[in-house]
Amino acid sequence: MTAPTPSPGTHDLAAGGAHSLVQSVDWVAVAPPVIVALAALAVLVADLFLTERRKSLLGPLSAAALALSLLALLPLTGGRRATFCTTAGPRACSYVVDTFTLSIQLLVLGAALVTALLSMTAVAQERLPAGEFWFLLLSSACGAALLPAARDLATLVVALEVASLPAFALVGLRRGSRLSSEAALKFFLSSVTATAVMLLGVSFVYAATGSMHLETVAERLPHTDSRLGTLAAAGVALTLIGFAFKTAAAPFHFWVPDTYVGAPVPVAAYLSVVGKAAGFSGLILVAVRGFPSYANAWGPALAVLAALTMTVGNLGALRQRTDRAHGAVRLLAWSSVGQAGYLLVPLAAAGHQDHLGHQGHREAAVGATVAYALMYAVVNLGAFAVVAALRHRGDDSAQDGRLDQYRGLARSHPFAAAALAFFLLCLAGLPPGIIGLFAKVTVFSAAVDAGLGWLAVVMAVNVVIALVYYLTWLALLFRPAAQRTAGRARRLPLPLTVTIALTGVLALALSGAPQLVLGFAATTLF
């Protein structure tokens, strides 16, 4: 395997033939997560001194920090940078910025910024503690931004937990709410179980290879002592199972619907995109970068997991009734499980290509997952933004989130209805939601190219199932409302209007020029 290219951020200092443990840090490379971390600390300190009336300033401050972290990605384009590298023995780095890292960081930080815009109204109207909310959101975003750059198992686990732990508190931040407390507990227990399994697997891998760095692990796993072969195989399996928990893949998806329903809507939107991106980026790194020698085992396992996940998710969404409380959020929750199945398809294809020794096809398959994740992030955040906006309609007194409440939305709020209709068409993969159609075709092609015809058939059947519930919701928007209330509907709050407009413009732009995202499928990510 080719050694990592020299980095300006790390260097080897020798004194009298001894390697120094002192190394410089490439601050430009680590700037995006560092900016978010510093902003989280600033919010925490500011919360101690600001009066209740002025704590509303913490939202714009957090959004500005996230926007600044996105700008910090610009100097990193066009090259590969690495830092926190070993100074003795074979060179291996713990933090690497490449195309894959930048793609996921763009997704994570962009989604966190949209969540911040969504949350400004929710924090005030649901009376959430502002200081705690913004600190937890920024802390979680910091961990999620760090994760795709991690290139050793220890950093991966730490980054994943930094992204997950604040999310528990965000879900349960609505004090006095039984649903919120129950959701936080389920999320906590499932995540702790996943972490325990993952840590056990990592310890086994370390015992078998003597290294935490993914490149070194990939080199040593095929040559593991025969007496440690079972230990290494168990470590690989447990590590991948731990990450499968984090991606909400079936049968590890049971916490998703209740967690999304109990959480504030912006937090549910954040978990559906950023939480999923963190889990999948970790799964890609450990499977494709760390365990390629076991591709003949994890490739078929992920294929079965993909088929099971998309089927369970879409059938769960299909069962949602229009008169059930919190039906809109539940439908999006089950839909996110189904979408996780689609995201697993290219990874299964990558495992099959690895087994065949087709590295170029493997990287294209990984690129298909990244491209699909970017599309999904934009349209799913937009759909959640409209769900959040419905809570502020002046013509509806009920706030239980039934799908029936969307009847007549095209008449009372044509802008929000048109946006939601477009987002649903994108998720369904129907024109004019071209980006959703092209993303599904890219994922479908990855399965066919890898020789996984049966998985492509399962995906096609699930796409048809998904059409039913997406189009059912879309039709409700243009049906007359069951009853009309006197007076005019209130205008949507400005942050929600901006969020819907921003995600809508992005979805339209990507539908007009899908190559902006789908080009990742043909890009060498590693």
Image (spheres, rainbow, N blue to C red):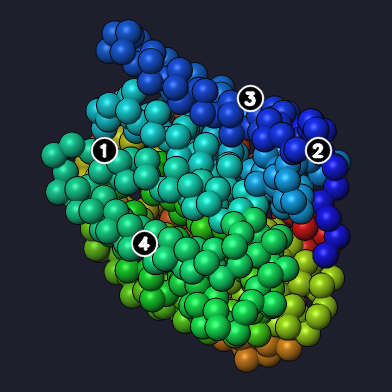
Residue type indicated by callout 2: Gly
Mark closer to the observer (2, 3): 2
- C-alpha distance separating marks 1 and 3: 27 Å
Which residue is tagged 4? Answer: 196
State the image quarter where residue 326 is shown: bottom left
Callout count: 4
Which residue is tagged 1? Answer: 173
Task: Tell me which label, 1 or 3, sits earlier in the chain.
Answer: 3
Task: Tell me which label, 4 or 3, sits earlier in the chain.
Answer: 3
> Residue at (71%, 34%) from the top-left corner?
20
For residue 493, say whether it is visible: yes
Mark closer to the observer (2, 4): 2
- Percent across and percent down for residue 426 are 60, 60
- C-alpha distance separating marks 2 and 1: 55 Å
> Residue at (33%, 63%) from the top-left corner?
193
SS for callout 3: helix
Residue type indicated by callout 1: Leu
> Residue at (55%, 79%) from the top-left corner?
228
Residue type indicated by callout 3: Leu
- Percent across and percent down for residue 223 are 69, 77
